[in-house]
Amino acid sequence: MISLALPVVLPLLSAFLLPVIARANRTTASLLGPAVAVVNVFFGLLIWQSIAESGPRTEALGGFTAPLGIAFHGDPLAALMVIAISALTFLLWPKGSHDPVREPVLTLLLMAGACGIALSIDLFNLFVFYELVAVASYGLVASQGSGKSYIAALRFLILSATGSAMALLGIALIYSVTGTLNLVALGGMSELLLSGPLGISAFALLLIGFGVKAELFPVNTWVPEVYATTTSRVAGLLCGVISKMALIILLKLLLTAFDNEAARTLLLTVGILSLLTGELAAYRAQDLRRILGFSSIAQLGIVAIAFSIDDTAGVLAGIAVAMHHLLTKPSLFLLAEKWGGRINALRGASSASKSGALLFTFIALSLIGVPPLPGFWAKYLLLSALFDAGEQLHYLAALILLMTTVIEAAYLMRIITRLFEPHAERPPSHARQELIPAMVLGGVLLLSVFIVVPLGEGLSRVAEQTVDQQLAIQTGVITPLAMSNLP
Amino acid sequence: MSMFGSLDPLLSVSLLTVLLMLGLGQHRHAGWLAVAAYLVQLILLGVMGTMLAYSPDKDMAIASGLQIVVMGDTMSWAMTGLGWFFAVVTVGAALFTAWFAAGAWSEGRQGMRLYQVCMSLNVFAMLLLLSSGDLLSLFIGWELVSWASFLIMAQRGGEAVQAAFRYLVYAMSGAVAILAAIILLKVNAGSLSYSAARDYLAGAPTSILWLCIGLFGSGFLIKLAMVPFHLWQARAYSLTPGPAAAFLGAISSRMGLFAIAAVIMTVVGMDRLIELEIPYTFLVARDLWLWLAAITIVVPTFIALKQTDARMLLAWHGIGQSGYMLMGLMLASPMGAAGGLLHVFNYATYQAALFLTVTAVAYRTGTTNLDRLGGLVTRMPLTFVAMLLGIIGLAGLPPMNGFVSKWLVYKSLLAQEMPLLFLAASIGTLGTVLSVYKLIHNTFLGQLRLEHENVREVPWSMVIPMLSLGGIAFITGYMPGLALDLVTIAQQSLGITALDYHLGGVNTDSGSLDMLWVVSIMLIAIGIGALVFLAGNRSKRVHQFDNYAGGHFLSSDMRYHYSHNFYPGLMRVIGPWYRGSIRWLESVLVSITAFSTSLSLGIFRSRFASYYPLFGAVVLLLWVGLP
């Protein structure tokens, strides 16, 4: 049986070894990163298979059990995220950089941190991996080397560091109340200790802290600036996987330590505000990459809304929207590589790059939620879950989701009509090679139109096993000890 | 017969047409291939029609073998008599407009492949919608129709894209309203089937019922372009390439009417609409629909009167005419529903004919501006005949079919004692008569312009479909029973008793109509008049410039064709009534959106963004601490 730690350890190790290898042989060094990503996909698949055979399981690294040791928990969602993270990292591997070491190392660290978040069930470890991801992403954003990207990275850093400080404060609060940071253990005592004002304050601080990467309102002001100045590949990675991992931390918290109404309402409110401000700002913005950034804020707001619903249907909808966004937004960013800048400059782009324009249109239609494309099913699931939940705030969320769909359609179609407008001056065209990663993602999206039935069943199982905390506690190795530590 | 007992052949042929056009659309003869494909579809529909007509079970639906279960929801497709009726009109309109486009019209024209793909895609999407077997497949068909229409509207580029974009925003707003209603029903009824929704709504509280009517209603009415949701239509249709505009004008909006019949009238139910009182008034829910229809008959018709572009004029009439259809259908009596549904068929015949004649004129003269045409009757006599047949139909006068359907609607308004609605409908007809006269006068009558001296009649490939449509409009006016055969199938599947009709018309207690007599007498009278005219004809044919008026010779530089500012006297009276209130409402909405978008963008522009985590934390902690 494969160890759960492998997808984290391998990229970490290769990140440290890469500078050494690069001195000996540059070609090997340049191939190492993508190879690790591919191997990591296999690790993810192996974990998926072993979970499918014998159910979710928890591993204590090095035999040290919690609260001292590090605990990893493998469930289908974690396996799915490991696969998605590694595959996307492979597709978006930084290419042709002037420094053969810096960007690959940072990308490997990013991958390791993201996989760590997927697998950890210890709040402190989650925080450590989150910080690892954060530091790697500052570096990646700044690696573009332009003045603008330095400024963006600096602002991002200040915002993110303030957020992390808050998150740490929240973690300290939890620890002072409960004496443990293991999520399964926290789940056991959340009713008792964390449902009061102190617990909710801790959650609020964590929400602000992790909300920075999750692009949640109001700590998402870095998004448009960073995405507009960094490379498309980094933007794709940040909005494609990193943001999802931050939201998955919040999901894990909601399912265990903060399984209460107040915390859910907080996340729901923040999600609604993100959705509304993101889509409205995207409608107004004029720069393609900024528009994509705002749209990504809105999409993550939708995921937050979904995760805040106290039902398997909500988690399912959240995973569906998140996976859909993970496929669509990076490929749109890749297409925007050549099409950055004002959307008015995009006139005539389709005659220069027909396949690029068609791909953009296809993905945009799915993002709007035109049936029978996958984006429609994701929105459909979410709306069903919201109507089923039936609180007033849920109806408000549904109303705003529907209204912003119209706005989303308007701004995306405005871009598309520009693309197909005949024009004398043609914007730069995509080289065929550059389109490949975007085409792969678009291809997966197209494929999922035809396999929507099994896909839906698979995702439902993932959601069920994610929500089923009883299962997690049964497979856990730590609960009795932690419970005995109750003050 | 087993192969024809299924919907699959029709849908497969329709899908195959799309694929064929995708592959071969650029070919010189692709147009004729499309005509053949629509003909096959029409034949398949004919076979299905005989099955539906002779089936003892009036609720029978011809089902497709395809069934998809997605996340616990079943999607299926089956065509009822109602869907079949609309499908016949759809494929028929596609056939004639494709025929018009197949020959000379498409020669040397850019982008014909896209055009053919769009057309066949529209037909396929509409067939999917019309055969939806549950609310989810209804929504998918609905969305496909919207996007397919957008594609065809936007084809011309430039201004057309702007108009299509406006349509899209309206259509998306409608679609999300419909989606909300569907999910509301699904969550409460536990299933997406029509029957489950019907059972649930039968006992549902009034608030839910109003919510469903409001959400479904606004979505469907946007497609049907009822006032106040009508602003998108005229411009979008008039900028669509000619034959496609004829197709859209003839049938596309009617998808909204189909959905109203299939969902509002059937799932919500007419009984509930009649029971459901509007709070604080003496009206019931149905009156709301009837009055919307009445306003739609009057307002757009008089807006049409002011248009100076032939396509805009026709497109505005299209909006107005759908008011008659909705009104008839909502009366839900045997005669009213028959009138409403018959009007769908009739309107499609003459509206397609009219759009095609205008396209033919534009093909030869390059303009549809009513101030820049005139006198073309001597140059394009066959097109003139087609337009004449069309406008008599549109105005609703005998001997054309438009008269019959309007007569049925009027008659049932009187029978149900609704004099105010009758008045509104009559005012609408008056406006229609005035403006269709303007259309034919400014185009074909009066003085020929010098630059049109050498204009010739359009080729036969265009003349035949126009005249055929006009001919159908005449024949089904002469023998309304032919069209009522189709209408009855739809009406019975709606659960409304069939009308007592015969080949020439209807028999009712309050009065009968026999068009065979009416038209025969008219024809005899016209024949006598013609004989008198020919017998006493001492006239001499002269060229129009070999002429004088008021003692002056008329030369070509002197315009005596009166076309600009038509009906000035009437406009002095009714002019102040044109307020543009709904346009104003639309602009208010646009401004609110613009304001809130800049506000949102402002949040992200803030120079103090780094303090946001602190602000956020303080606000959240306050929220936690205060209660």
Image: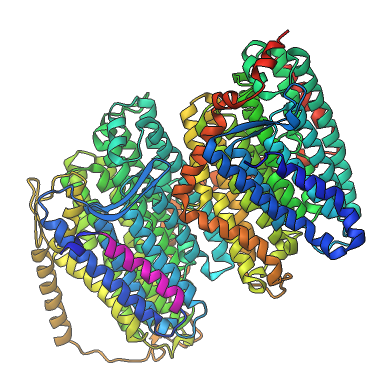
In the rendered image, the vertical position of residue B75 relative to residue B467, given as above or below: above
Residue B24 sits in quarter: bottom left
Front position in the image: B548 or A417: A417
Question: Residue B325 in the image: x percent, y percent?
Answer: 29, 51
Question: Is residue A188 located in the magenta-colored stretch of the structure?
Answer: no
Front position in the image: A450 or B400: A450
In the rendered image, the vertical position of residue A379 relative to residue A388, given as above or below: below
Question: Residue B58 in the image: x percent, y percent?
Answer: 15, 48
Question: Residue B183 in the image: x percent, y percent?
Answer: 43, 37
B416 to the left or right of A395: left
Front position in the image: A118 or B539: A118
Q: Over which residues does the magenta segment extend?
A: B7-24
Q: Is residue A256 visible?
A: yes
Which quarter of the rendering shows the C terminus of chain B? top right
A125 to the left or right of B19: right
Q: Please give the name of the residue rendered at 40% of the width and 86% of the height, measured from the top-left corner.
A: B548
Q: Please give the name of the residue rendered at 42% of the width and 81% of the height, measured from the top-left corner.
A: B105
Q: Please give the name of the residue rendered at 74% of the width and 57% of the height, measured from the top-left corner.
A: A34
A51 to the left or right of A65: left
